[in-house]
């Protein structure tokens, strides 16, 4: 059973190392693909210090395109998406996303933050369709590559695909995990701008 982990990253030099370290420690994962989405910091250099495949996009194209790019390199039984800014990620979290695909009649798992930081846990319980932590069986790779998605709407597009294709999915609680919010990454002003831009793209896609 071959499992590929995909980590899309944009300006995550301070956080991506811990995510890669945890992923490489998980015995279920066969290989890791990091996509540096045109970062302006040293994300590429940091990721390249590990024994993983690192793809560098020449300019920022958005998370959706980063995921699609990585999927083109996947020939595996299971794929798992992990955000590069996760805080508190453990190998047990990764295993809990993968195991249902091995033993149950499940095609995709969706990780939901629980008992981590209040804001991120609350946000995911309200909008679980926005979770970036997902694992799915290899036969769905082409379907995801073919999705009409861009920018921040990758998770919404995949959630819509689940409903349209009647894909059997399961939500998995991930205890004690969270991620860095945009205001922490970019400062209050720029962080709020990025957050509003993200919400705008998501709402626009949902209205289609």
Image (cartoon, rainbow, N blue to C red):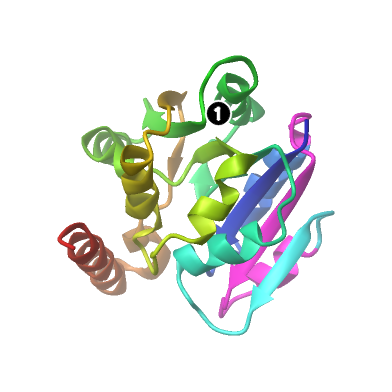
Q: Which residues are magenta?
A: 25-48
x then y, percent, for residue 51: 84, 54
Q: Residue at x 53, y 60 (%)?
A: 145
113 relative to 57, above or below: above
Q: Residue at x 61, y 28 (%)?
A: 98
x then y, percent, for residue 137: 60, 36
Give the residue furthest to the top.
103
Q: Residue at x 76, y 35 (%)?
A: 25
- The total of numbered circles placed on residues is 1
156 relative to 66, above or below: above
Q: Which residue is mark 1?
A: 97
x then y, percent, for residue 14: 59, 60
Image quadrant holding the C terminus, namely bottom left
Give the residue furthest to the front.
165
x then y, percent, for residue 52: 79, 55
Q: Can the viewer see residue 84 in this picture?
A: no
Q: Quadrant of residue 112?
A: top left
């Amino acid at each position: 059973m071959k499992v590929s982990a995909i980590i899309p990253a944009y300006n995550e030099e301070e956080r991506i190392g811990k995510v890669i370290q945890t992923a490489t420690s998980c015995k279920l994962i066969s290989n890791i693909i990091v996509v540096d989405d045109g970062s302006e910091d040293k994300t590429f250099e940091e990721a390249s210090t590990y024994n993983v495949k690192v793809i560098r996009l020449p300019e920022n194209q958005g998370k959706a395109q980063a995921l699609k790019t990585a999927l083109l390199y996947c020939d595996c039984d299971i794929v798992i998406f992990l955000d590069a800014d996760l805080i508190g990620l453990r190998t047990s979290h990764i295993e809990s996303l993968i195991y249902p695909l091995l033993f149950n009649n499940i095609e995709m798992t969706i990780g939901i933050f629980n008992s981590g930081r209040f804001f991120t846990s609350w946000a995911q319980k309200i909008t679980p369709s926005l979770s970036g932590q997902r694992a799915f069986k290899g036969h769905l790779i082409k379907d995801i590559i073919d999705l009409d998605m861009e920018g921040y709407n990758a998770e919404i597009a995949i959630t819509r695909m689940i409903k349209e294709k009647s894909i059997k999915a399961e939500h998995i609680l991930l205890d004690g995990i969270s991620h860095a919010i945009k205001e922490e990454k970019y400062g209050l002003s720029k962080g709020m701008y990025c957050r509003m831009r993200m919400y705008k793209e998501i709402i626009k896609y949902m209205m289609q």
